[in-house]
Image (tube, rainbow, N blue to C red):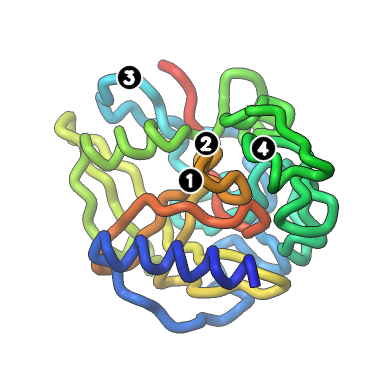
Amino acid sequence: MKSRRLLLVAMAAMLTAGLVSCGKDDENGNGNGNGGNNGGGGNTTVEWVDLGLPSGLLWATCNLGATSPEGYGDYYAWGETTTKSTYNWSTYRYCNGDYNQLTKYCNISSLGYNGFTDNLTVLEAMDDAATQALGSGTRMPTADEWRELINNTTSTWMTQNGVYGRKFTASNGKSLFLPAAGYRWGDELFYAGSFVNYWSSSLYTDDPTGAWIFCFVSDGQGMPYYGRYGGFSVRAVRQN
């Protein structure tokens, strides 16, 4: 099964990066602003932190859909701008019912619907959940921008106001907290409090059924790819 294969690929990549496997958590989260199927409640105002990164990029202090740094927020499939109750290929916006029937963001004809390709490799603004929720100038980070964050900060597993996650501290003394919000697969929430997947805006071009993600657990962090149908967290960025 394609979805299971991609899950195993992601797990294998994370283990290579020094991560450990986690057990399934309570599917309704842990009361950090992510109640119901998708949680959140929406960002009406956004605060930004300048970590002194080489690109000058600013990072939002909360997940998309959260109202505090510890809030889990909402979960999105890659290229979708609204939440939903079930995350799988049959409900995914940009395929015709299955992983090898892609209708947008496809560079390999055997995976496109009727041989479709468009060679788009980064989300357009109309398909970027951060842009659509917060307006022009805000967006999801690319895979390289996630790597920039990782390479220019010190990451520590911790609890903040009782919520597990990772704190990224820059040389200028400023920091960013990312909660371990878990992820949605099918109609359930997995690993909340111990694991998280954050989307990048970058397609995984070796297999365009997936996109690059940033993920972490208590023992480490990594940058694998995952099937685009998964319900993952989003953290917005913008230029200074």
Disc 2 to disc 1, how far (Cα)?
6 Å
Between disc 2 and disc 4, the foreground one is 4
The residue tagged 1 is 212
* Mark positioned earlier in the residue sequence (1 or 3): 3
Between disc 2 and disc 3, the foreground one is 2
Q: How many numbered callouts?
A: 4
The residue tagged 2 is 202
The location of residue 2, given as percent across then percent down, is 63, 66
- 157, above or below 21, in the image: above
Q: Residues within 10 Å of mark 1 (few under 14, many from 20)?
A: many
The residue tagged 3 is 55
The residue tagged 4 is 106
SS at badge 2? strand
Q: Are marks 1 and 4 in contact (CB under 8 Å)?
A: no
The location of residue 191, given as percent across then percent down, is 49, 74
Three-letter amino acid code of the residue under disc 2 = Ser
